[in-house]
Image: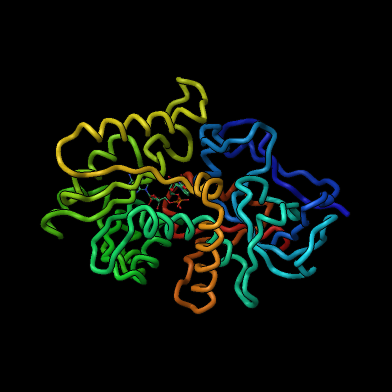
Amino acid sequence: MRHKRVVVTHYGGPEVITIIEEDIPIPTAGELRVKVLAAGVSLPDVLAREGVHPETPPVPYTPGWDLVGSVDQLGPSVMDLQLGETVAAMPIHGCYAQYVCVRQGEVVPVPKGLDAAEAVAVVLNYSTAYQMLHRSAKAQRGQRMLIHGASGGVGSAMLQLAKLAGVEMYGTCSEQAASVVRDLGGIPIDYKQSDFVKEIHRLTGEGVDAVFDGIGGDNLWRSRDALREGGRVVTFGFQSKMRAGRMASHSEGRHPFRESAELGGFIVRNWFKSGRKSMVPYSIQWMLRFKPAWFREDLLTLLELLKQGRIKPLIAQRLPLEEARRAHEMLGEGGVLGKIVLLPNG
Ligand SMILES: NC(=O)c1ccc[n+]([C@@H]2O[C@H](COP(=O)([O-])OP(=O)(O)OC[C@H]3O[C@@H](n4cnc5c(N)ncnc54)[C@H](OP(=O)(O)O)[C@@H]3O)[C@@H](O)[C@H]2O)c1
């Protein structure tokens, strides 16, 4: 049997995304084959395509951090899973395909009756938001926090989870996304037309308890300025290095570890700044590697919240696999509200 799979042939813009047809993969010992119902598209996919994300695989490779699909074939020695059962997984790359083989230990059962696109939004985006909120910032009811990029995939997830946790959440966004942020329970701050540090102090007085900063660079110092004494910046991305979905400068070459090293520099410099304000990094891939039990526990909690209707992912677009390139172009252009999802099997 044949299937379609997206391939990044070399690092670069959306034009490096192609689609191939080949025999479907056969699961080896300890693996199962999943028929992919939904694959998430995210900025980390765009950064890997550019060759600068710390998780960038060697080319040629298939992008896609997360999937939801039905169990299609069990490899030798795989037990406790039923054919047709719906599962979720986050193999970090490889999910833009009609069929994918994953290790049994990687999959989490998805409750019956959930929409696959909404369930896949929970895997990378809600897990990231949930772990930053509860494990990195240790959120408590009544606290005030700020998320940058509040109308995007991770941002919109954070707003819903903060509301459930009783946290008052401020969110930077473009003017046209303000009503979406408000609907999700956040207080919008237009990052293009106002100074978010001044706005935070005007609205809160002393500043917020935590800022979640996926923008990086000098924005981290401004996020720090928005904190009250004893507050914490959780740094989780480097969007400031991007322009229209491409790395702003390739003059230094492509080095997937450069951004992590630069981030380390910010954290060290923070130690020498005045005031009791901390800066901590968050990385879901390192959480997955070092605390796999937490990842599993948190994802199961989130899928249960989805089943109970207590969270409702904002799906910006549902696109066929053939439109993977378009999905990357859209993320690069900006203005996407929520999560873009590919539906590889229609
Ligand atoms: N560390 C981790 O484990 C982890 C996991 C997942 C994602 N991430 C990171 O999380 C970030 C968001 O990813 P995503 O997939 O949610 O992306 P996304 O859906 O494209 O959302 C990004 C949002 O940021 C907004 N934005 C752009 N520049 C901004 C600025 N200077 N100030 C405030 N907002 C700005 C965009 O708004 P407009 O388009 O309206 O400008 C957009 O809504 C990325 O940095 C990604 O690498 C990290």
Q: Residue 120: x percent and y percent? A: 58, 62
Quarter of the image that includes the C terminus: bottom right
| Quadrant of the frame with the N terminus | bottom right
When the figure is inspected, residue 278 is found, relative to residue 251, above or below; the finding is below
Name the side, left or right, on which 98 lies relative to 189.
right
Q: Residue at x 82, y 60 (%)?
A: 73
Residue 24 seen in the current view: no
**Is residue 320 shown left or right of residue 302?**
right
Q: Residue at x 53, y 63 (%)?
A: 297
Task: Look at the picture and state if 5 lies above or below 54.
Answer: below
Foreground of the two, 229 or 310:
229
- Furthest residue toward right: 1
Callout count: 0
Residue at the (75%, 67%) spot, across then down: 80
Q: Is residue 288 left or right of residue 280?
A: right
Q: Residue at x 52, y 30 (%)?
A: 256
User: Can see residue 81?
Assistant: yes
Residue 98, percent across and down? 74, 55
Location of residue 271 by image quarter: top left
Residue 49, image x, y percentages: 58, 37
Asked which quadrant contains residue 266, the reply is: top left
> Where is residue 186, by image quadrant?
bottom left
Residue 36, position in %: x, y? 71, 59
